[in-house]
Image (tube, rainbow, N blue to C red):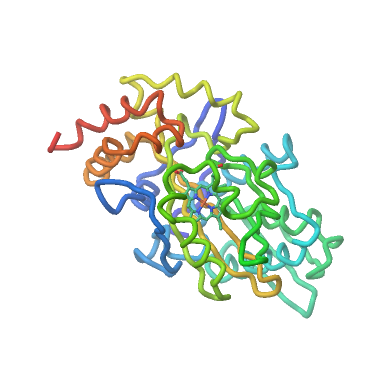
Amino acid sequence: MRVAPKEVETFRDDFTYSNSPEAIKRFPFPFPEDEYRYSVNMEPHTPKGGEGSAYEHFLDIDEHYLSEMAERKLVLDEMPHRCLAMEHMELACWDMLERLMSSLAQDYSDYFKLTIEGDQWTWENKLLNIHDTFTFGDSSTLPQSPLEYIGCQVQGDFALLDQRDGDLFLDAGMITCPADWSLAFDAGMSFKEWHGPVPMAHNEGIFERALKYLTAMQVGSPIRRLNWTLTVNARMDTSPETYHEWGHERTSVTPENAGEKVYLRVEMQVMDRMPRSNALMFIIRTYLISLEDLATNPEWARRMHRTMKTLPAPLIEYKGLSRYHSMVVDYLAQFDPAN
Ligand code: HEM
C-alpha cells in the first residue's frame, strides 16, 4: 500500500470522508468510451496500471481502510442480518477466509501475517490490532463466523454463490454498502432472479452470456468488471433497509452544490472460483469520488459529461438519478469544450 490508512472518517451524519490527491489519481474511472451502455464487460483480474494502482493486487487496501471497517461495524451492530450464510455454505466461507487472508498476507506483508501449522492458523492484522489463533474449519475457535470475521477486515462487500444445475444462487454474503439492493431480499435467488430489476440487459442477452462465462470459471483465474452509479453525499450504506435515511437526500441536490454533493460510485467487482466448495466468491469493492474531485482530471470530466448526457432514460430511472440527473449534466458541461 503506497498510501497509509487515514484516521477514521465518516460516511454518514457529518460526512467527513474525503479523497487525498493520491486517492483521486488512482480512482478506477469506469468509462472507456463517451457513451455508456450495459455490456459483458469482464476481464481477467490481473495487475494493471503499475505500483499503487487500484488494480495492482487481488484486494485493494487503501487510505479508507479504517473508515470502511468502522462503517461496517456500525451497520452490523444495528442490522446483524446484513451478514448471512445458509448452512450448506460453511465450507465456502472457509474457502473465502483462506483466499482473503493469504492474499492480504502476500500483498500487504507490513500489515497482515498468516502462519499455518497444520490446521492451526495464526492471523495478525496490525491495522486493527487483531492477533488470533484458530483451527481451520472449526467455527467455534473464531470469535465470529468465518464470513463475518474476515469480512470485517477487508474493504468491499462479499457474496458467496453456490453453483448447481448450471446456475448460481446467492446463498451467503456480507453486504453493508450496497447500491440500493438487499441481501436479505435476494438471498437464495438465482442469477437471473436477483438481476430481475435491471432494465435493457435481459433482452440484450447480457445475463445469459455472463452466466455461461461465470459457471465455467476455474480456480486460479479470477475476473473483474466495473459497475457504477451516482450517490448523494459520501454515503456507503445506500441499502433499501436504510432508505428512510438517504432517499430524501436526492432532493437536496441544487445547481450550486452538485459538484460537492454528488459522488460517482464505482464498484470494482471481482469473481473468483473457490477450491474446496466450488462456490463463486463475488467481491464488490466500492469507491466514492465527488464530481468536483473527479473534475480535477480534465479527461475524466469531459468523458463523464458525455456519458451522463447520453445515458438512456431507463438507466437514469433504474439507477435512481431522475431527480438530479439534469443538474449533473449541467454541472459537468463546463468541463466539455465540445459543449
Ligand atoms: C446489478 C449482483 C454479476 C451485470 C446487480 C444487482 C445485484 C447484482 C444484487 C442489483 C439488482 C437490483 O437492482 O436489485 C451480482 C452478483 C454477481 C453479479 C452477486 C455475481 C455473480 C454480474 C455480471 C454482470 C452483471 C457478471 C455482467 C454483465 C449487472 C448489471 C447490473 C447489475 C448491468 C445493473 C447495474 C446498474 O445499472 O447499476 N448485480 N451481479 N452482474 N448487474 Fe450484477
Q: Which residue is found at the position 56% from the left and 71% from the top?
A: 106
> Residue 234's spot in the image, x, y percent?
48, 34
- Please say if 167 is above or below 239: below
Above or below: residue 199 compared with residue 205: above
Pick whichever, 283 or 320, lies toward us. Answer: 320
Whether residue 70 can be seen here: no
Farthest residue to the right: give it: 140
In the picture as drawn, the residue positioned furthest to the left comes out as 338
Residue sitting at x 31%, y 20%: 255
Residue 18 pos. (x, y %): 44, 38
Q: Quadrant of residue 321?
A: top left
- Which residue is nearer to you in this view: 61 or 323? 323
Tell me the quarter of the picture where residue 91 sits: bottom right
Q: Is residue 223 visible?
A: yes
In the image: residue 40, left or right of residue 333: right
Direction bottom: furthest residue:
118
Left or right: 295, with 147 as reference point: left
Position of 118 relative to 206 (above/below): below
